[in-house]
Amino acid sequence: LTAYLLVRQRFVGQAAFEFATMLSFAIPGTVIGVSYILAFNVPPIELTGTGLILIVCFVFRNMPVGVRAGVAAMSQIDGSLDEASRTLGGRSFITLRRVILPLLRPAVVAALIYSFVRAMTTVSAVIFLVSADYDMATTFIIHRVLNGDYGVAIAYSSVLIVLMLAAIGLIRLLVGERRLRRRAGSAPIPLPTGGTA
């Protein structure tokens, strides 16, 4: 939705809005972690020590990836598709759901998988946010190494690597099949080359 607004719409403060969506990528992870603790450690929104604060951190930390992928994909989609949909009576939501989103599927899936891999392997942004009840694999591995449990740390690291490889293989499979179907469905129609009678 953010990519759709940035590419298809024109409004006051668009440059500032685009800069704000990319800001979390420029801030160090440790600064973000400490900021979340200071912001959500007091009522009325007290999230420190819960699993929700980890989810919120991951969403806003990785949002620039999805936004830039969406903007790149939206820039390749001709605006005439939107105009044709509106001419045929389709509202903006219908146009977005039935015309734009299917074309953005490869970019969306790639951004989701990248964000998943980044969230599973991040340390700096969550080192201050984990708790005894809600721990992360990366911080757990670090604690095991500090305690001298190298065997457990290696085992968890191996499982984490396998999960990351499976996620990368999944994105390649999904996007690859999508491209193959698109190429097969858009085969060029041969032109008639009959001679003159």
Image (cartoon, rainbow, N blue to C red):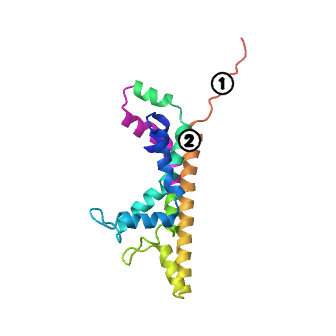
Placement of 191 over or under 30, stated as above or below: above
Quadrant where the N terminus is found in the figure: top left
Instruction: Please provide the residue range marked out in magenta.
Output: 88-112
Are there few (<14), some (14-19), or many (20+) residues within 10 Å of tag 2?
few
> Is the stretch drawn in magenta largely helix, strand or loop?
helix
Q: Amino acid at mark 1?
A: Leu
Badge nearest the viewer, 2 or 1: 2
Does the magenta run of residues contain 109? Answer: yes
Nearer the observer, 119 or 100: 119
Are there few (<14), some (14-19), or many (20+) residues within 10 Å of tag 1?
few
Q: Residue at x 45, y 66 (%)?
A: 33
Please name the residue that numbered disc 2 is placed on: 182
Q: Residue at x 66, y 24 (%)?
A: 191
In the shown orientation, is residue 174 left or right of residue 93? Answer: right
Q: Amino acid at mark 2?
A: Arg
Q: Give coordinates of residue 21: x percent, y percent.
A: 47, 49
Give the structural element (helix, strand or loop) at label 2: helix
Q: Residue at x 38, y 78 (%)?
A: 132
Q: Quadrant of residue 99?
A: top left
Residue 191 disc label: 1
Cα–Cα gap, marks 2 and 1: 21 Å
Asked whether residue 109 is in view, the answer is no
Asked whether residue 48 is in view, the answer is yes
